[in-house]
Amino acid sequence: METENPRLNDTLQRMFLRVRVTVNITRPLPTGFWLATQNHQTLWVDFKYERIQDSYCLNYGVLGHTKKECSSPMAVASWDHMQPKYGLGNEQGMD
């Protein structure tokens, strides 16, 4: 895993942290995770992926084919039947 320092001269330059990690691309990409904070609350942390739009299926959350090539009807989130389950930054994962 690699990370970059978002601070310059002790000043936060942006509100995100860019990391490079190894993931199993034969499984749906994680959309985020719940982070336990110091005050015992949980915070959802969204994952945003760079440079994968051309080969990322929003129906299945996997790399390898695009929505245009996918023959499956759109997967939808159980809490909102109009929203795709997968997307670049959606917090809902496919069960």
Image: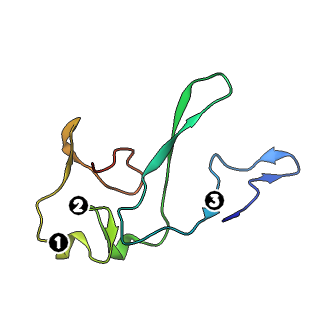
Looking at the figure, which quarter contains the N terminus?
bottom right
Give, as a three-letter code, the residue at label 2: Asn
Q: Which residue is mark 1?
A: 70
Q: Secondary structure at mark 3?
A: loop
Q: Which residue is mark 2?
A: 59
Q: Nearer the viewer, residue 37 or 73?
A: 37
Q: Nearer the viewer, residue 13 or 34?
A: 34
Of the residues under marks 2 and 3, which one precedes in the sequence? 3
Name the spot of residue 86 as percent of width and height, x first. 31, 54
Name the spot of residue 61 as percent of width and height, x first. 32, 62
Image height of 38 relative to 76, above or below: above
Residue displayed at 26% across by 62% down: 60
- Label 1 vs label 2: CA separation? 8 Å
Residue displayed at 59% across by 66% down: 21
Give, as a three-letter code, the residue at label 3: Arg
Residue 89 falls left or right of residue 22: left
Marking on residue 18? 3
